[in-house]
Amino acid sequence: MKLPVYLRQSWQIMLKNRQYSLLYIVGVTLSMAFIMAFLMFVLMASRSIYPERDRDRMMLIGSVLLCDEDGNPKLNTMVSSRFAALLEGAGIDGVENTAVITYSGLTKGVDLEVPGRGIVTVPELYVDDGFWEVCQFEFISGRAPSGEWNPALPEAVLSATTARRCFGTEDAAGRELMYGGTSLRICGVVRDVSVMAMLADAGIWLPIQMGREMASLIHNEPYVGTDMMCLLAGSRRDFPAIRAGVEEVIARYNASFGKADGMYISPEETVPLTYLGASTDAHVGVFISAITAMVLLLMLIPAVNLSGMVSSSVEERIAEFGVRKAYGASAGVLVKQVLSENFLLTLIGGLAGMFCAGGLLRLLSPVLAGSKSGYGTGVLQADLVFPTDMFLRVDVYAAVFVSVLLLNLLSSLIPVLRAVRSNVTDSLNEKK
Amino acid sequence: MIKLIEISKIYRTSEIETMALDNINLEVREGEFVSIMGPSGCGKSTLLNIAGLLDEPSSGTVELHGKPVSGLNAREAARFRNTELGFVFQSFHLIPSLNVLDNVQMPLLYRRMGATERKERALKMIEAVGLSHRVKHFPSQLSGGQCQRVAIARALVGDPSIILADEPTGNLDSKMGAEVMELLHEVNKQRGKTILMVTHNESQAKQTDRIIRMLDGRIIG
Ligand SMILES: Nc1ncnc2c1ncn2[C@@H]1O[C@H](COP(=O)(O)OP(=O)(O)O)[C@@H](O)[C@H]1O
Ligand SMILES: [Mg+2]
């Protein structure tokens, strides 16, 4: 018996048992969608992703805790530009590079005026030169900003999607557009950044000097700021030394202001450093691994349920296998038949699962994006593109598909093997 | 055609041993229609299963077409069943997820044969049992009598020489039972198939060439 015969029969059996097939397919779809969405979330949140390739060496200072003289917490705020400058200039041992990112924090993206196209609104980030070293962008066109600040014609980088929206092409390096009455020169276009990026997601990256101007109008320096800072360590072993270095900078910073306005960056709580990379701190790593394992187990429940359903359906067909054997079917043929039936159903469910996982991720992405640290994200996510290459993680998808397939094949294999091993009369007499 | 020589069958469970067949000797000639009668549990089905290579005797020899078949391995026995034997069961044993056509073709799937020929042969058999208008129906949409006729078409489709029928009318009312009996007689007369049939119905048994009566695993006449 050849493969087309198996598949044709499987197809017929599927159509005949509509309710079962539908349940089966929905089961596979949901299992795969949930497992995949979750896995991707874990991968995105804990592993290095484009363009944050060195997450395991990154230390993020997203917010600082301000306290009064007695150490009572007063305010949680992002890093002030003065503090950022002090940190940057401190030359802390082990720090290979620093990036400062500032959020204007008040707008819902920026309005870009494109000659001939009108207004295009995109989420923005103001970044310093170090940012382009710490993050590893892929340039589709042009290059990173030169680092020379030219107030008359600042340089900006666009995401591929933004470039298409503004100019109808990704090859937009050298073009100009207007922002707030100033001309901008597009020096480069980069591949779209996922919303799962911690630091780097935007549609346009503007020079930090422009952000400073805006922030100075709004914020109350020196304590309150809108910066986020990333310290790139040479290796993770440098983390403790870097932390100690940061403490020193804080002490100096506090000393430089005296008690005049009664606000301090808390010397005890200090700066909450957000460590990226699950296992940076041993206990944090264990905690995250444990949660991951638990959630993954929960996610497996639909898959296990499904395998129970598969198993009992094969169980119910033992008499059928008996008749087939009476009429000359060999054990191998029966096993192949059952496997091909399950393969077909899992395949259909798996394909549907891929699309559902995509939808699920899209649905969840604002929540995931909102869970990132930093103040500006609530504003930023508003208009963000959701790059499709994120769902097309072929490796993740293939791994999940293969495990669900194996689970299903195994749960059909055990009863079918039992059926084909027992003698024909026993199978025939099996109660349906 | 069918020859059982000193066949015994003992079922062993952890507690008890059941002597289902006790030194059976039986010969059925080619083209003969033989019925087996006897009280429930006397070993009729066991005998039929052993003659049909569905079960193995504890001792003794089975000869079909003059050749001993007791020594065949599982694969050879499956081949032999596929080409030489047809089965009809009390509970029909149709495959519920397949339509009439696919149920009837099923035995042909397990031999080398093209799809077109399979379908042609199946349709011819379905016509022979008078169900051409039910080809696309599923077993659940048929009456018991119709189901058994489908089962008979399935038994015949591979053109076997021997049909083994275990209480083929046991689940049917008398009218449908009579129709099925009529069909089996036709299969025996027109197609020349050898039939060994278990029945509880004295008048049906009387219409066959010979009646074998069993009691407690032995043939008593
Ligand atoms: N698989 C089995 N295991 C144990 N005992 C069996 C098995 N099959 C049949 N028997 C026993 O063998 C005897 C003959 O059974 P069977 O051939 O089915 O009788 P009949 O068909 O005449 O009613 C009965 O006592 C039955 O309980
Ligand atoms: Mg019986």
Image (cartoon, coloured by chain):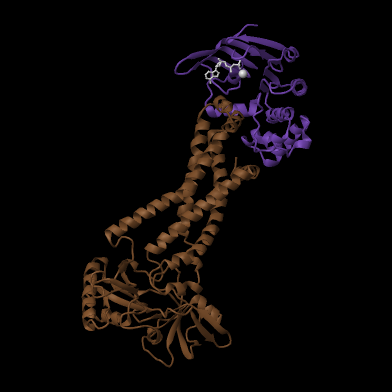
Q: Is residue A34 left or right of residue A149?
A: right
Vertical position of residue B172 compared to residue A59: above or below: above
- Residue B151: x %, y % from top left: 69, 29
Q: Residue at x 46, y 74 (%)?
A: A380
Confirm whether residue B158 shows in the render.
yes
In which quadrant will I find the N terminus of chain A?
A: top right
Vertical position of residue A82 compared to residue B46: above or below: below
Q: Quadrant of residue A288?
A: bottom left
Vertical position of residue A85 compared to residue A299: above or below: below
Q: Is residue A38 left or right of residue A15?
A: left
- Residue A428: x %, y % from top left: 58, 27
Confirm whether residue A64 shows in the render.
no
Colour in which chain B is drawn: purple
Q: Quadrant of ligand 1?
A: top right
**Foreground residue among A235 and A66:** A66
**Foreground residue among B131 and A152:** A152
Colour in which chain A is drawn: brown
Q: Residue at x 60, y 47 (%)?
A: A22
Residue lying farthest bottom? A152
Q: Is residue B18 left or right of residue B81?
A: left
Q: Residue at x 44, y 67 (%)?
A: A369
**Foreground residue among A65 and A326:** A65
- Total numbered badges shown on the rendered structure: 0
In which quadrant will I find the C terminus of chain A?
A: top right
